[in-house]
Image (spheres, helix red, strand yellow):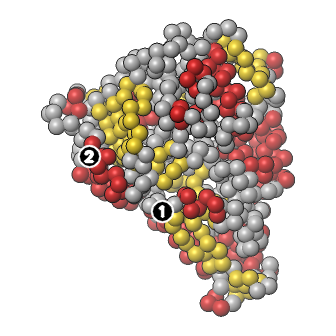
Amino acid sequence: MTTRRIRSAAAAAALAAGVTACSAPGGGTGDDAKAAESVVIGVGSEPDTLSPLLGYGKDGNSKIFDGLLAHDTDLKLKPALATALPKVGDGGLTYTYTLRDGVKFSDGEPLTAEDVVFTYRTVLDAKTNNTARSELDAIKDVRAGGDDTVVFTLKYPYAPFAARTVLPIVPEHVAGGQDPNTGDFNTKPVGTGPYVLANWSKGEKLTFKTNPHYWGGKPAVKSFTMAVIADDNVRATRLRSGDLDGAVLPPNLAATFKNDDGRRSYQAKSYDFRAVTLPTSGKVTGDRAVRQALDAAVDRQAMVDKILDGAGRPAYGPLPADDPSYAPGIERPHDLAKAKRILDEAGWKPGSGGIRAKDGQRASFTLYYPSGDKVRQDHALAYASDAKKAGIEVKVEGATWEVIEPRMKSDAVLAGFGSVGDPDFGLYTLLHSSLAGDGFNNMAHYDNPVVDKALDAGRRTQDPEKRSAAYDAIQQALVENPGYTFLTHIDHLYVLADRWDGLTTQLEPHEHGFASGPWWNIEDWQPKK
């Protein structure tokens, strides 16, 4: 459900020289403490931009930037650039923050309230290509009350607003003179975070070093590199060979390191789910009966057991079953007989090769998944197998996002979404009809007035009971009229050399590896003694 676009990484072969150029784990010095100062992590993708004005770091955990607030290990809000949590007034319509004294950007210039105002106003400007703008819809105005005070005025009381102020703050004196969509700031960022970008070789690696002006102290890890390796198997091989200190891995590959005494595995619970988008403009996927039949035909538990090796849960909607806003009773068993019955009643009759047809239209469509993503590929193949048993042909194709994006309006995609925190954070961008086709928002072009009304109600009231009723209504509506086939909620798995103390995991969103992971707090790591 997160909306920042992630670019597929370049081919593994193009990356070999880039990773070799990074300091290898251990550094060859024989000094473990010295070696621990530099870390090389293998990730599957890289961001298109490092500018928060275009969505980078909007949910926190950027190492280059800070927000007014930040999350701790348990995702509770804590002060960052602000000295304390906000003072809320006027019935939830005003939020006042006082800035921390003495904070400087990495270029040595001081942080002021005007930088905060500039950041939010630029994100909210319709000319800025930020597809996460709807997440700040509640803001009516943001103004500075002197150098160290910022006041937000809201259009309506928005219960989770404080959690939206983890948005990274950028310097007006640098970004203010540029076009936010095309300026150098996108690849040469300046922030207040613990690290600065030292080098970015697109499709290969991003290297970071400590920020000499960081307000939060000096990290023990002096530099780290994110090596961009799209192929899961190559990432595992490089970790095993010692080229990497750590990596994000799918379950089957993470399991191969289980008995490695020199490495430690981490498993993070997440809101990350895999789902098949079913565009309503498609000749087959646009039929509600087909969508309902697919929902019944899919064997979610088998996907958890066989694809995820148990590292996940069946997904019956966008929220996991242990979320406080999860609607009890929406669980659906694997029911092939029901799927066939739905199709029979809707006029989809068995035809050539067992594939159904209606009015001359075969029940056949293409399902794309991003190449190199073995977990999505396996989900897509299992989905196609389940669909075929009901008489629906799903043709699975791997492709780059550059190929997939133009086809998202009419073709199905094995997609990943999921945002932690308030249910509004993920559901609105996933389902609201006003966001259909807006980047990766509402990829299925789902249009359901009942859901739109409930999304708006959940966003615009602070009454817990009314909010609960709204999100229950949304989840029930998705059962009756699915725009996606929800498959699994996946756990995130990481393997790292066991050379540091202080590593923890958080409850994670869909986007992980680059920002989320055991390295979310890398500035707090300490070398093992």
Mark 1 element type: loop
Residue 253 seen from this side: no
Q: Where 200 falls versus 418 (above or below)?
A: above
Looking at the picture, tell me which residue is in the foreground, 73 or 35: 35
In the rendered structure, the answer to whether residue 66 lies left or right of residue 165 reads left
Looking at the picture, tell me which residue is in the foreground, 396 or 391: 396
In the rendered structure, the answer to whether residue 325 lies left or right of residue 101 reads right
Locate residue 520, reporting x and y percent. 45, 34
Q: Which mark sits nearer the N-terminus, 2 or 1?
A: 2
Three-letter amino acid code at the position of disc 1:
Ser
Q: Residues within 10 Å of mark 1 (few under 14, many from 20)?
A: some
Locate residue 147, reporting x and y percent. 63, 9
Please tell me which residue is depicted at 30% across the width and 52% down the height of the picture: 16
> In the rendered image, which residue does mark 2 sit on?
20
Locate residue 32, reporting x and y percent. 20, 31
Q: Are marks 2 and 1 in contact (CB under 8 Å)?
A: no
Mark 2 element type: helix
Disc ID at residue 371: 1
Extreme-left residue of the structure: 30
